Image (cartoon, grey):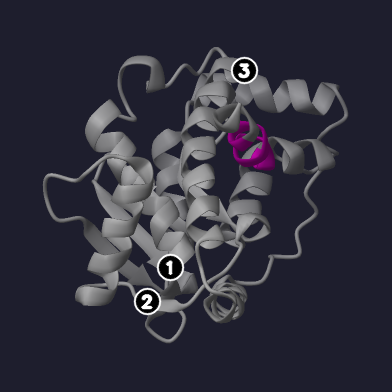
Amino acid sequence: MRPLRLAALLLALLAGAATATAGTGSGLTAVVQKAEQLRGLQTTHPLAVSAVGAAGMRRVVAGELAHEREPRSDAAWNEALHLLGVLGRGQSLAAVQRAQLAGQVAGLYVPRGGRLYVLAAGGKAPRSVIVHEVVHALQDEHFHLTRGPFAAHPQDHDEELATTALVEGDATEVQERYVAGLSPGDLVGELATALGAVPSGTGAHTPAYLERQLLFPYTAGDAFVKA
């Protein structure tokens, strides 16, 4: 299975801020406008946003994983990781990634449906998550995340990881600037909200190599965009 091209925000990258209802209303509108300002791009139509619970987010992630599956390439990559000792006996790449992502995704923009999903905690989601995902919606509208240089290349894992890093690094850099502009009180509130919104891990063992690969687009991508 190729590196997941979901526009997903992980718990490890949440910096936290005040709460905003993830649906309609002035709260969401203000967050979208702030994301547009920070990124220097604007939407031309209202964003479709769904606030879902942990179970709903797992279903969305599972559906996207199934959609992105490339049977021949996935089987070859799975075999290579076993030969390299990354995966042990009884482990499969698909199962590890499914467990890994299902327990950590807090926000998700799906290009093929043009819908933004945010994890709801009591009907609310951290604003920093929404900002990150709005940037992905802006990227898709202006640069098309499923075509051209961002199209899938199942035979070239390095190319896909690099393009994913550009997409996630861009959104992470904007998110960091959003958080940096918060007041101390809002910053504390966001951190509390973010930690409360993200589901706990599944407990499944994830090989260190796959953990690093999952984090790479955010960390290395952020450094690349800044450079």
Q: Quadrant of the N terminus?
A: top right
Q: Which residue is mark 1?
A: 127
Mark 3 is on which residue type?
A: Asp
Q: Which residue is mark 3?
A: 158
As drawn, 172 above or below 16: above
Residue 159 falls within the magenta-colored stretch = no
Number of dots carrying numbers? 3
Seen in the image, is 99 located left or right of residue 144?
right
Mark 1 is on which residue type?
A: Arg
| Rendered residue at 23%/66% (across/down) | 29
Task: Check if mark 2's residue and mark 1's residue have beta carbons within 8 Å.
Answer: yes
Of labels 2 and 1, earlier in sequence is 2
As drawn, 208 above or below 73: below
Q: Horizontal and vertical percent for residue 23?
A: 25, 72
Q: Which one is in front, 150 or 188?
A: 188
Binning the other alpha carbons within 10 Å of mark 3 as few (below 14), some (14 to 19) or many (20 upward) gives few
As drawn, 181 above or below 199: above
Q: Which residue is mark 2?
A: 20
Query: SS for tag 3?
Result: helix
Q: Which residues are magenta?
A: 214-222
Query: SS for tag 1?
Result: helix
Of labels 3 and 2, earlier in sequence is 2
Q: Magenta stretch mostly in which secondary structure? A: helix
Is residue 98 visible in the rendered image? The answer is yes
Q: Horizontal and vertical percent for residue 225?
A: 55, 30
Q: Horizontal and vertical percent for residue 58?
A: 48, 62
| Rendered residue at 19%/76% (across/down) | 25
Of labels 1 and 3, earlier in sequence is 1
| Rendered residue at 50%/62% (across/down) | 181
